[in-house]
């Protein structure tokens, strides 16, 4: 199986879907001539032309709405945000137009659109460029939200997102673009709404998604080495719909659970996971469920403070030790 | 025009009786705008509107029964009772909806224009919005992109002078909406919105520009609403005088057209009366249909959140 970066896996998904369906087009800032702010769209302008790779002005609200308008006529736009930080300006179109149109038209207007781009913190980009909107977006009925952590999932989920007849949010990661992994050639589709057990285990469940998957796997490694603990790592992959079955099967087996996420703690994704677990697996729990999140502060610039604010291998391992009563 | 007028009068009655809920924005006084502009369109052209859109739905051919049933929230409504007054949809007639965030549908119109060009079609998209939307960022972004990409979109601003209770000149540095077109190198025209034929002719010119080369146009159509902003707003309120409203009513687009037709010998008093009887019967039938239609089935609550 070929090894690709996460960036090239996304590029492959876009290229294959644009070849497959003439209604698919890419629109956003710097996607064409510049080849993509993060080079995800490299080579697409040359292959598909300016009709299907549309450079826009810096106008997130406007071009998100342009995408929705095109989708209202049956085209399948992929709207790239340079980062989800800027997409905050487009929330009116994502929520009030894309997510609600099908419902408020009585089913007449499905909106087959993808909104994608990097989400969450990179390195020392400070408060306005280091935000994870997972919980905000997953809150809204009418949207689907996926968060690929590996190159293979990036390709498979983006392809599924483009073929879906609903608005799908794809949350990528600037820090993930250069990561490498095996990616199946050609028709590789990852179903939306299916979690993935990235490491099987029996003693504690670590729930994670997107950029917390790698630290969760490292924490599992650490726990195995230091304590002989067998941690199961469940990558949610989709936040809406959320695969309760895989999550619960794991917690029912281990009886202990830690949830890691990049977002802030208050009303976060972890809070939703805890709700599901306490409701459906209460009698199986041997300890309270603990959460690892970003600190409840805007992201600081300073490197030391930034590290202190982010979820980490150590924080996830420490939370796992606590639910195992090892500390 | 008469159908729209009588329909809206009945709507006001039904609202007062509690048969229609939520926010409800009437079109009385502005009829010449929807009717005149629509007369310039083909059935395969697209129309997209703000939340004051009962008239546009009717003139695009959505049956009055389906519109009234939607206002009643009934299962037989044009949005199956899920949209209401502000979210009428009939995609089969390319009536792409009422949208209720001021200015929010302007980028959608640009997107529909992009899709027309993408497919190499010669349709146009007419986007109706009030003058208050000019002050919101979406207006600027949508106009700019439509012009840069030469899209067949007609931005039809219905300038009725008040954004809810705020007179335009109190909140806009440039009060001639038409002047905004210079910022986007866009064709523009100022139109008397109380004259249905003037509206039709101006829209025809805009349509021609759009079909010929995909050039967008900004039409500022000056009109006036005789009713409050919504059903919860009194007839003239504190933001305008009774005298002003009464004065504007002398420009009633329906009376003006009737007079013109009478002078031209095309319609006499008896003919007008007969037309009115016919229209009232149609509206009464729509009300009866809405009254007798069922509410949506409770299972509909979860239907259509997502498409299949």
Image (cartoon, coloured by chain):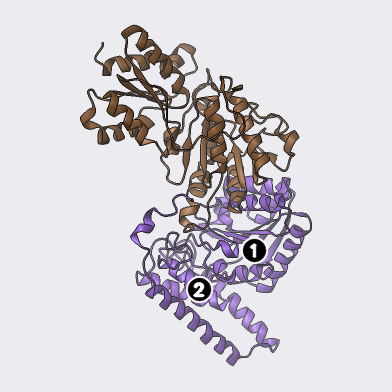
Chain colours: A brown, B purple
Q: Earlier in the sequence, mark 1 or mark 2?
A: 2
Q: Report the side of B201 relative to A233 (left or right).
A: right
Q: CA distance from mark 1 to mark 2?
A: 25 Å
Q: Nearer the viewer, residue B106 or A197?
A: A197
Q: The disc numbered 2 marks a residue on which chain?
A: B
The front one of A140 and A124 is: A140
From the top left corner, tell me how far across and down residue A299 is, in percent.
Answer: 46, 22
Circle 1: element type = strand
Residue bearing the label numbered 2: B64
- Image coordinates of residue A178 in percent, x first then y, are 58, 20
Q: Are marks 1 and 2 in contact (CB under 8 Å)?
A: no
Q: Is residue B3 left or right of residue A196?
A: right
Residue A86 shows in the view: no
Based on the displayed image, in which of its 4 quarters is residue A140 positioned? top left
Q: Tell me the quarter of the image containing the N terminus of chain B.
A: bottom right
Quadrant position of residue B97? bottom right
Q: Is residue A27 left or right of residue A224?
A: right
The residue tagged 1 is: B221
Task: State whether residue B301 is above or below residue A301.
Answer: below
Dot 1, crowdedness within 10 Å: few (<14), some or many (≥20)? many
Q: Is residue A114 above or below residue B307?
A: above
**Residue at the image position 54 percent from the left and 74 percent from the top:** B4
Residue most extreme to the bottom: B270
Q: Chain of mark 1?
A: B
The location of residue B160, given as percent across then percent down, is 57, 63
Q: Nearer the viewer, residue A183 or B248?
A: A183
What is the secondary structure assignment of the residue under circle 2? helix
């Amino acid at each position: 199986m070929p090894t690709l970066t996460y960036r090239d896996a996304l590029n492959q998904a876009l290229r294959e879907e644009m070849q497959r369906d003439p209604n698919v087009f890419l629109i956003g800032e710097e996607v064409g001539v510049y080849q993509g702010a993060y080079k995800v769209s490299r080579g697409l302008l040359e292959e598909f032309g300016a009709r299907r790779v549309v450079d826009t002005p810096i106008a997130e609200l406007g071009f998100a709405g342009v995408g929705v308008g095109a989708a209202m006529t049956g085209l399948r736009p992929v709207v790239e945000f340079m980062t989800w930080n800027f997409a905050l300006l487009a929330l009116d179109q994502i929520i009030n137009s894309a997510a609600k149109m099908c419902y408020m038209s009585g089913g007449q207007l499905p909106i087959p659109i993808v909104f994608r781009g990097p989400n969450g913190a990179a390195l020392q980009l400070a408060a306005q460029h280091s935000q994870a909107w997972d919980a905000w977006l997953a809150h809204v009925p009418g949207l689907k939200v996926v968060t690929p952590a590996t190159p293979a999932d990036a390709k498979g989920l983006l392809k599924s997102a483009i073929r879906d007849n609903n608005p799908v949010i794809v949350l990528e990661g600037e820090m993930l673009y250069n990561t490498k992994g095996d990616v199946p050639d050609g028709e590789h589709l990852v179903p939306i709404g299916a979690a993935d057990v990235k490491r099987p285990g029996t003693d504690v469940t670590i729930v994670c998604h997107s950029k917390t998957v790698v630290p969760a796997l490292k924490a599992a490694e650490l726990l195995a080495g230091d304590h002989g603990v067998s941690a199961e790592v469940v990558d949610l992959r989709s936040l809406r719909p959320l695969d309760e079955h895989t999550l619960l099967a794991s917690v029912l087996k281990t009886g202990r659970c830690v949830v890691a996420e990049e977002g802030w703690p208050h009303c976060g994704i972890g809070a939703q996971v805890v709700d599901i677990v306490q409701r459906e697996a209460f009698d199986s729990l041997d300890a309270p469920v603990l959460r690892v999140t970003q600190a409840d502060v805007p992201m600081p610039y300073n490197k030391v403070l930034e590290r202190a604010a982010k979820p980490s291998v150590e924080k996830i391992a420490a939370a796992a030790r606590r639910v195992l009563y090892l500390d | 025009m008469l159908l729209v007028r009588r329909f809206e009068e009945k709507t006001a009655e039904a609202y007062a009786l509690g048969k229609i809920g939520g926010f409800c924005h009437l079109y009385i006084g502005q009829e010449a705008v929807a009717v005149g502009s629509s007369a310039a369109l083909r059935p395969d052209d697209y129309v997209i509107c703000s939340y004051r859109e009962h008239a546009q739905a009717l003139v695009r051919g959505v049956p009055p029964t389906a519109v009234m049933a939607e206002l009643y929230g009934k299962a037989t409504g044009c949005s199956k009772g899920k949209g209401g007054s502000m979210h009428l949809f009939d995609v089969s007639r390319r009536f792409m909806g009422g949208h209720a965030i001021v200015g929010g549908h302007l980028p959608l119109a640009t997107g529909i224009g992009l899709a027309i060009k993408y497919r190499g079609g010669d349709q146009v998209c007419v986007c109706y919005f009030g003058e208050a939307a000019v002050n919101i960022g979406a207006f600027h972004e949508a106009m700019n992109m439509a012009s840069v990409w030469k899209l067949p979109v007609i931005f039809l601003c219905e300038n009725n002078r008040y954004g809810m209770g705020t007179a335009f000149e109190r909140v806009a540095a440039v009060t001639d909406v038409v002047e905004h077109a210079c910022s986007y190198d866009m064709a523009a025209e100022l139109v008397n919105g109380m004259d249905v034929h003037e509206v039709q002719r101006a829209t025809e010119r805009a349509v021609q520009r759009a079909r010929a080369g995909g050039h967008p146009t900004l039409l500022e159509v000056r009109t006036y609403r005789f009713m409050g902003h919504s059903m919860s707003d009194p007839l003239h309120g504190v933001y305008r005088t009774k005298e002003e409203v009464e004065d504007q009513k002398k420009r009633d687009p329906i009376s003006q057209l009737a007079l013109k037709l009478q002078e031209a010998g095309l319609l006499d008093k008896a003919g007008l009366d007969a037309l009115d009887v016919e229209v009232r019967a149609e509206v009464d039938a729509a009300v009866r249909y809405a009254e007798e239609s069922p509410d949506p089935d409770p299972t509909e609550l979860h239907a259509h959140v997502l498409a299949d």
